[in-house]
Amino acid sequence: MTGPKPSQTTVAHRVEYGIKSGIVSVLVVGIRRRDPGAIVNAGLGLAAASLPDVLEHRYDLEFRPWQRVYATIAMLTHAFGMLGPYDDVWWWDHLTHTHSATLLSGIVYAVSRRRGRDPRPDVIGVVACVGVLWELMEYIIHRTADRLGIEPILITYSKFDIVFDLVFDLLGAALVLVFGEQLLENFIDDTTRSP
């Protein structure tokens, strides 16, 4: 005899839990390797993976199951990348920049739409500014770590890397501008939807 089938929400929660377990695994491996980049990024990833819960509670929002999984995967890919894929897989950095940019773009898109504004300039402007600030922070952290003789938690590879990072950030923003109305409708009030 078989029991009831689990709902999509139950399955998504199990998947989300598994992904968070993956982030914890990165943290453990980082500790064992004494890899500060993996430790810091996994710790921040775990904190960021809890944001959907905080936002739902504080702002009376409801994430769809796939949205929670999507956001948590972004945290895992970034943390896991610190264990080697950023150095060994040529497209890993492009993937994580695009993925992270879709998360930031989604937030900006939903806030703009809830305020009855055209989200396009807000999404492009915020993603471009945050992308530049991120690259500047990455550069400062890398140079400071080099001067102190410690392993950096973030790495700038080259000027071309910076340009590619910004291009893929803007690709993430463009994806949200194209698909945001359909994929983020649960965060947009009915009164502010486009006709």
Image (cartoon, helix red, strand yellow):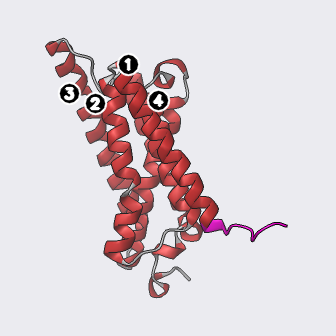
Residue 32 quadrant: top left
Q: Tag 2: residue type?
A: Glu
Q: Tag 3: residue type?
A: Ile
Q: Quadrant of the N terminus?
A: bottom right
User: Label 1's element?
Assistant: helix
Q: Residue 5: within the magenta?
A: yes
The alpha-carbon separation of the residues under discs 1 and 4 comes to 14 Å
Query: For the view shown, which residue lies furthest in the right direction?
Result: 1
Q: Tag 4: residue type?
A: Gly
- Upstream in sequence: badge 3 or badge 1: 1
* 186 left or right, relative to 3: left
Mark number displayed over residue 81: 4
Q: Tag 1: residue type?
A: Arg
- Upstream in sequence: badge 1 or badge 4: 1
> Which residue matches tag 3?
140
Residue 34 quadrant: top left
Give yes or no for contact between labels 2 and 1 (Cβ–Cβ under 8 Å). Answer: no
For the magenta stretch, what is the residue range?
1-9
Q: Nearer the viewer, residue 113 or 86?
A: 86
Dominant secondary structure of the magenta stretch? Answer: loop
Q: Position of residue 123 (x, y in %)?
A: 39, 58
Query: For the view shown, which residue lies furthest in the front direction?
Result: 1
